[in-house]
Amino acid sequence: MNNLELWQSVLAQMQFHISKANFATWFQNTEIISRDNEKIIISVPNAFSKEWLSNKYNKLILKTLRDSDDSIKDVEFIIKPILAKDISSRISAANEKPEEIQLKFDEFKINKETNLNPRYTFSNFVVGSFNELAHAAALAVSDNPGFTYNPLFIYGGTGLGKTHLIQAIGNKVSDDSKKKRVKYFKASLAPIDLLILDDIQFIAGKNKSQEEFFHVFNSLYEKNKQIVLSSDRPPNAIAELEERLRSRFEGGMIADVSLPDYETRLVILKTKLQEKNMDLSEEILDYIATNVKKNIRELEGALNKLLVYNKINQTLDLETVKKLLKGFVFSPFDVANYKKIIETVAKFYNLDEKNLFDVTRRKEIVRPRQVAMFLLRKELKYSFPAIARKFGGKDHTTAIYAYKKILQENEENNKLTEELNLIKQRIYSG
Ligand code: ADP
Ligand code: MG
């Protein structure tokens, strides 16, 4: 038996022992890459698979290997990132019957009992350093709801996978145990084992809702029922959130999702293509991954647009791609302009734009104003006198002071760093 056959037989066995979702998550893109006497070396795509396989499945894998070949005494896992070319070869293999190509966009329906969309699963969620922690926490929660991290709070900019991830938890819990009652979004008082609330920032300022939610939260929490929340920002940055709710949210696990890098964007594109059984040239994929950087939703939108075009009109060349994707591609200077910065900063701190220019020493205003000045300097390279003029000042030392202060605090204060990152994400995501 060669390495390939040996691993195929292990994988075939594994499927009997673990759930489909777990199998897909941990065994996808693994293979035996070599054999060192009594030791088998298995490659895995990332650090999480490595940790998980060596802690959780080590014994089972070894036993299964030994069933085929009892001279094997040990296994070792090494990380070998998924290479673009491996994926493309699999895509081409899947594409052998072109007449069967179909666009599978609306194939899933919302589950009426849970309100979950079955399209959102762990197995089609791409993991990279930008979302590793949130993904690991979500998996841990879905394996042991109510007892690992409670609540689990996931935050990050729009289109970065929050909804996908928290619904994946719900889908997995309800698949693993048909007895568990899972509810997404609608907080009813019915008995629930897992409550998922998306975009919790909208509860801010609504006192009655906060009051009700506080009671629902407590009653579930006391019964060790899992609560999963998402928001566009961390709890400490949600203005007008009651202190008691904030402290409840902070009592569990807080994890963020941020922007994927070029390599991960490419992997995401290839994963989506594979799901749809479609293919595009490397050149085109490289163009999309290089230029569509705003978020994963946009990446998906760009891809779908090309696929629809490609289906009708088989000749998709780079020039056409560039034309089709005009609206998706931007340079930082297109979006980070003065208006955008002022608008975004004001909105982030729940102020009216004109408040930023108020002549006042009130802390709630001074800080946002300094942040706005800082960003004008940092992102748009405005001169200090130009900044001072915008803020109605004759003297540009205020602008210099603001810039230095934010720069220095950014080094020392994680909360501010986090705020600046979120604001920048929003400025650049349109
Ligand atoms: P958010 O709730 O943060 O605004 P969504 O969860 O709605 O973002 O994600 C936007 C789109 O991008 C969805 O279609 C989702 O399936 C896809 N997506 C997001 N993150 C990933 C990921 N890590 N891997 C694969 N697809 C993703
Ligand atoms: Mg969402």
Image (cartoon, rainbow, N blue to C red):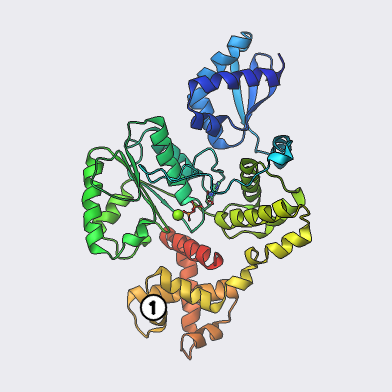
Judge whether 388 appears above or below 233 on screen: below
In the figure, is residue 417 to the left or right of 302? left
Amino acid beneath label 1:
Asp
Q: Residue at x 64, y 41 (%)?
A: 274
Q: Quick check: can you spot residue 47?
A: yes
Question: Disc count in the image?
Answer: 1
- Residue 117, by quadrant, is top left
Q: Position of residue 228 (x, y in %)?
A: 36, 46
Q: Position of residue 225 (x, y in %)?
A: 28, 39
Q: Secondary structure at mark 1?
A: loop
Q: Position of residue 168 (x, y in %)?
A: 45, 42
Q: Residue at x 42, y 74 (%)?
A: 346
How many residues crowd mark 1 within 10 Å: few (<14), some (14–19), many (20+)?
Answer: few
Q: Quick check: can you spot residue 88?
A: no
Which of 200 and 311 lies nearest the eye of the viewer?
311
Which of 69 and 179 lies nearest the eye of the viewer?
179
In the figure, is residue 226 to the left or right of 380? left
> On the image, numbered disc 1 is attached to which residue?
352
- Residue 177, by quadrant, is top left
In the rendered view of the protein, which quadrant contains the C terminus?
bottom right
